[in-house]
Amino acid sequence: MNDRNQVIRYILESWASEENPWNTTDELLQWIERTRQETTVSIRKIPYAYDGYWHYDKNELGIVNDQRSYFSVKGIRQKDDTGVKEQPIIVQDGIGYLGILAKIIDGRMYFLMQAKIEPGNINHCQLSPTIQATRSNFTRKHGGKEPAFYQYFVKRQNCITIADQIQSEQSSRFLGKRNRNMILLAHDDVEVPSTHRWMTLGQIKKLMQYDNIVNMDTRTVISCIPFVFSELDEETLSAVRKLFHEEAFFRSFLEHSSGDAIRKIYGKMNDIKMTGNFERELIDLHALKDWSYDGSAYASEQGNFRIVFCDIEIEGREVRCWSQPLLETVGKSEFGLPYQIGKDGIMRFLVQTKCEIGCFDRVEIAPGIQKEPLDERITDPVDKLFFEKLERKEDIRFRGLFSEEGGRFYHEENWNTIMEFKEGELEELPDGYFWADFRTLNTLIQFNNCLNIQLRNLISLLNI
Amino acid sequence: MNDRNQVIRYILESWASEENPWNTTDELLQWIERTRQETTVSIRKIPYAYDGYWHYDKNELGIVNDQRSYFSVKGIRQKDDTGVKEQPIIVQDGIGYLGILAKIIDGRMYFLMQAKIEPGNINHCQLSPTIQATRSNFTRKHGGKEPAFYQYFVKRQNCITIADQIQSEQSSRFLGKRNRNMILLAHDDVEVPSTHRWMTLGQIKKLMQYDNIVNMDTRTVISCIPFVFSELDEETLSAVRKLFHEEAFFRSFLEHSSGDAIRKIYGKMNDIKMTGNFERELIDLHALKDWSYDGSAYASEQGNFRIVFCDIEIEGREVRCWSQPLLETVGKSEFGLPYQIGKDGIMRFLVQTKCEIGCFDRVEIAPGIQKEPLDERITDPVDKLFFEKLERKEDIRFRGLFSEEGGRFYHEENWNTIMEFKEGELEELPDGYFWADFRTLNTLIQFNNCLNIQLRNLISLLNI
């Protein structure tokens, strides 16, 4: 099992399968639902003036807690040639673990997933990676137990590393926040607690058909599976060929002309990184232009989110209650990944370079459509085509609602859409957009901080 | 000429050739020497107390100029689990261009290189890229002409982009300084000024045999040539096969198991990025612990360099004189790239992860040997083997002196060595070291900020 060809074959076979001797996909859904029912989560907004363990501290430029742990919410100001932008931003420096343990059992690869309560999420309980631990969690800054499975990801003993990349999160909400996305293939037996279950990749993908079931962290980790480094041998190729339902997608995996797309995308990103007079600084949260608090929230008419404080109570096997700040969105975002099947029979996806205020290095690659609630919907021919086709319900291959970070965001759910653009529908590609085959995107995912989380999450929805 | 196979073949053929209808390699050497002789460069250290256009400003935390342009020298303090480190550092935020224009003339690829005066360099005139322009240069903050060939690299019209990566410079001297390394293949005729000449890649490599002739910027750009993205077709493969003198190096180009080495290296780098309590801040240059000025320089007994001020006068076609701060090294560094030919007949190079105070993202990949003047020479079995073999002059495939940045450093030259480690000589690989084939290193170079400049420069010395 040290052969990468074999590993990729197992992953693809797991992707193509929902067969599972322990749990059908329906049973997994019921298990998540049952976990949800067994736990009472009460989340209640309280006045923004709240001043307890979490509180505003002018010297710290924003909202912190007594221990200066977890995260803080500060103000940020960015100046560049296009003007000055100000908004609140979450600062969370430590890199956390998002890790999935995989194992081959009776010739099939399964992934160990967790039914995890996250109070901010719309339905409280979602499918999460094997481990999902912030730096404050695993350094046990607040006491408590070591997160389950932590030692696997730190020591990686008797494991094959399938994926290991430090990836960004929402750069419109976080300042350079990154998590380590890992998938490990364990050789030894794994003891499975009642919070976790084995499932195939196909089952995880099937659960993505349901709104707000597969959490953001699962989706980003799944998107990191590397398919590109190993050249598949003939035997593997012919074996995996029949797993694919769509020839154009299979060819998008294999296509070898990635170099050109990568060079074009890098050319544009490098142009952006060189554009001048870029300055970014943290400023006092309560001195932000156009932002103010109205009793219930710290908000702005132009803001895609507001800052609220919540009392949270979780009652399950144990009772925990606390108060904390959360970001509450003012509506639903639209994230869309258009694709097109070229005359050469290869499926290519539409992506764009995107600068967001919290980007680790100014710019990342985003899906063709990325619109926050208050963003103008139609600004160029790509938007126009997408929203017109959406209106007509035309060529929509997938559309579903997914939650973002349930530990930082309040009841946020956004539309994720995969849509086919027919050859010729989009006459000209506006500046900053690129067509990229799956191989190109999968290559770029192997290098920290190229694709943003919205794009990675959309990629995770693709089906074999 | 849009076929990547063809481009790579032209590059490899140019690498294997010194044939040049306009200039033999000797004539190029004479041209550089003549340019040097035609220009009088006088560089004279003046007291550190100098207070003119460049001067110490406490509010700016260090040495700046009146226009706050070019660069500044500040203090930096880093705290992590290993303790506190302080030193001066050059802050230079804008990304500059290091670009080489290539062209195919009568079936052979030539690179347009410049004989460029850099006052800090030991022999003043060295072979430089077509364009070498800081942000202050090309934004013409100080008036002056637009740098020659600037429009080629901004517009890239009628050019194929061969390489385009933003790469770091010495992270022990610069805080996150990066330059855009580019190679463009021009389709149109190029007007060549007397400062520039066409040469094959083989000629550039030959000139590297001479001490302090090929400058740092040329070496880093050359190292970025991508060989890995395109799968070479059979015809190209058999054509280029005979260009290689060493089978083990050819196989190191082609080897397809890069994924494993890349995953191991990323695993280690990600571990380092996650290690805790890392803080870095700019502090007052003149408040650095153990640093003080003695009239002639700002220095420390533990410092690998001192800060000096120099009066510089360049007298050639025009006369220019100015004063500026420079970093003066206290000795020669040893940069070494050991390689080994495995039982499988593949050449692999020894690299290590290295944290330096100015790293853009905490850690980069360095050559197996990277010792600044005051660094302890032997700290592990790799050092021991390298320096023992060096002492015995054993298996040294290349050893030469090269200058670093002549615009920031004063008379700095460092040893660059490529050495073979025989199978079995290095019993165990210490933690943090990795064997990587050429394909792995070349893949990692395609992604900004993986390999540090010392490693990239050593890679540029390799011969086909």
Image (cartoon, coloured by chain):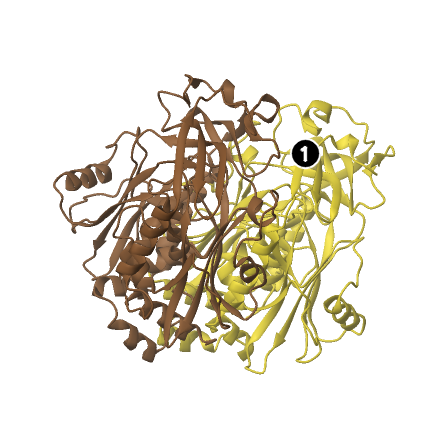
Chain colours: A yellow, B brown
Residue A78 image position (x, y, % from top left): 70, 41
Near-viewer residue (A49 or A178) = A178
Q: Secondary structure at mark 1?
A: strand
Q: Dot 1: within a 10 Å radius of its alpha carbon, few (fewer than 14), some, or many (20 or more) residues?
A: some
Residue reaching furthest to the bottom: A343
State the image quarter where residue B241 is shown. Answer: bottom left
The residue nearer to you, when weighing B139 against A160, is B139
Residue at 24% x, 60% y is B346
Residue A250 x, y percent position in the rendering? 51, 75
Specify the quadrant that holds the C terminus of chain A: bottom right
Q: Quadrant of residue B290?
A: top left
Out of A386 and B220, give the one closest to the viewer. Answer: B220
* Left or right, B353 with reference to A120: left
**Viewer-nearest residue: B110 or A198:** B110
Q: Is residue A17 visible?
A: no
In the picture, the quarter occupied by the N terminus of chain A is bottom left
Residue pushed farthest right? A294
Report whether residue A276 is seen. Answer: yes
Q: How many marks?
A: 1
Q: Amino acid at mark 1?
A: Leu
* Residue at x-position 13% and y-position 43%: B393
Instruction: List x then y, in percent, for residue B315.
Output: 43, 42
Horizontal placement of B326 versus B332: left or right? right
Q: Chain of mark 1?
A: A
Position above or below: B204 against B316: below
- Provide the residue designation for mark 1: A282
Coordinates of residue B302 in the picture (x, y in percent): 36, 23
